[in-house]
């Protein structure tokens, strides 16, 4: 019970941080750019939040909502959700001071008309080089550019680090040109280590402006392949062979983006274009429902009415891509990396076999190759186990207004 002379919470205006509102069909995304905290509200819920931000008390906002929509809203739940999202400024908390996003000017230059012209010329030069000399077209055989397998592994690893960085930098610059900050972390995809750039701030910009930041990494990969092919055509000897290997490994990374079940850049593009919420999870559950119906296990069916309607519609065709995607991934591995990997692994193990008179240099090369190769696989498995453990501990909060 409130003390005399003190207003109750329902009659005290909320101090909200500056919020952005993005209308997209029948949903409105509301969030803070400084903390990149966003939530999706229905239009009437967003209108209620706007009312609170304009200075209305929760009681006044409830009265307004009832007069506007003909029913009483549970404003207390909305206020609690706003607090959990960090939208409500605590008593005495100062307004956040946000300066300009770093590298925004560089991001605009990297995707300016002049830059796109240069990118087009580079790709055209590479295409002409391949037409004139088909031997420049990257193939799996290009991976074995040395008799020393550890050298191959080390060189490709050392070169891959800056190339992956360029891929992520293009993502980040395409976002920063819009004033969006980014974060980078290491993860895994199926059987490969990857680096991911998080652009949560894209939720606060209109949909058509999200496409370039999503596809920017693939633009970088195409440019890197073109530059590697051009250099291989101009150089000779070991340099040309290394560039051919780099072109092929970059091509494989570009190909991964079309394995949609891995939630790659192309997957993100599709979900953005369609306006999906969690297409992957919905597709997995829909596929599980099909299998359970086929096996007559109706007690294990998931209630499809609980899924987001956009996800449910898209999952009808997207769910078929999951098993197809795994098959294509394994096929690509067996064609592009598997034979070379197995050949080098077998040859390395053979050097330690009885009757094989390997020099100490060959033995050292084999040992280093095996440690580096299987060490990466072990690291990927460790990351997978860690993320699975984190997923079990995580709690998903839904905002319903």
Image (cartoon, rainbow, N blue to C red):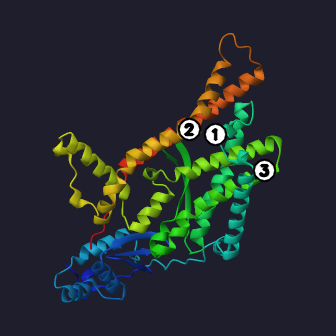
- Quarter of the image with the C terminus in it: bottom left
Along the viewing direction, whichever of 119 and 350 lies nearer the viewer:
119
| Residue at (80% x, 40% y) in the render | 238
The residue lying at 77 percent from left, 52 percent from top is 231
Pointer 3: what residue? 233
**Towards the viewer: 364 or 149:** 149
Q: Position of residue 326 (x, y in %)?
A: 43, 43
Mark 3 in CB contact with mark 2 (< 8 angstroms):
no
Query: Residue 25's mark?
Result: none
Res. 140 mark: 1
Q: CA distance from mark 3 to mark 2?
A: 24 Å
Q: Look at the picture and state if 257 lies above or below 323.
A: below
Which residue corresponds to mark 2?
335
Is tag 1's residue or tag 3's residue first in the polypeptide sequence? Answer: 1
Describe the element under mark 2 as helix, strand or loop.
helix
Q: What distance separates the C-alpha of mark 1 from that of mark 3?
A: 17 Å
Res 278 → quadrant: bottom left
Q: How many marks?
A: 3
Camera-nearest residue between 91 and 331: 331
């Amino acid at each position: 019970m409130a003390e005399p002379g003190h207003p109750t919470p329902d009659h005290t205006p909320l101090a909200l941080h500056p919020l952005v509102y993005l209308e997209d069909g029948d949903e409105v995304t509301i969030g803070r750019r400084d903390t990149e905290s966003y939530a999706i509200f229905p239009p009437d819920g967003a209108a209620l939040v706007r009312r609170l931000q304009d200075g209305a008390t929760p009681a006044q906002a409830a009265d307004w909502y009832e007069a506007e929509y003909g029913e009483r809203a549970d404003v207390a739940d909305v206020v609690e959700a706003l607090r959990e999202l960090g939208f409500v400024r605590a008593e005495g908390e100062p307004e956040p001071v946000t300066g300009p996003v770093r590298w925004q000017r560089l991001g605009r230059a990297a995707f300016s008309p002049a830059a796109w012209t240069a990118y087009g010329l580079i790709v055209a030069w590479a295409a002409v080089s391949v037409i004139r000399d088909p031997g420049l077209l990257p193939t799996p055989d290009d991976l074995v550019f040395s008799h020393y397998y550890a050298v191959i592994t080390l060189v490709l690893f050392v070169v891959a680090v800056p190339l992956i960085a360029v891929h992520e930098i293009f993502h980040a610059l395409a976002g920063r040109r819009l004033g969006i900050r980014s974060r980078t972390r290491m993860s895994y995809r199926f059987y490969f280590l990857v680096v991911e750039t998080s652009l949560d701030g894209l939720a606060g910009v209109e949909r058509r402006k999200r496409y370039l930041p999503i596809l920017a990494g693939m633009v970088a990969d195409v440019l890197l392949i073109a530059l590697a092919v051009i250099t291989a055509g101009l150089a000779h000897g070991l340099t040309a062979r290394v560039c051919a290997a780099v072109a092929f490994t970059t091509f494989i990374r570009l190909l991964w983006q079309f394995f949609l079940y891995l939630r790659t850049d192309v997957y993100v593009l599709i979900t953005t274009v369609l306006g999906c919420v969690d297409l992957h999870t919905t597709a997995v559950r829909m596929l599980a429902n099909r299998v359970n119906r086929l096996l007559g296990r109706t007690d294990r069916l998931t209630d499809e009415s609980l899924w987001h309607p956009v996800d449910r519609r898209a999952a009808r065709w997207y769910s078929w891509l999951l098993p197809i995607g795994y098959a294509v991934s394994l096929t690509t591995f067996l064609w592009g990396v598997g034979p070379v990997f197995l050949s080098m692994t077998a040859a390395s193990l053979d050097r330690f076999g009885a009757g094989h008179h390997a020099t100490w240099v060959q033995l050292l090369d084999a040992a280093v190759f095996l440690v580096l190769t299987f060490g990466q696989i072990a690291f990927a498995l460790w990351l997978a186990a860690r993320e699975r453990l984190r997923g079990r501990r995580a709690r998903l909060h839904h905002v319903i207004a």
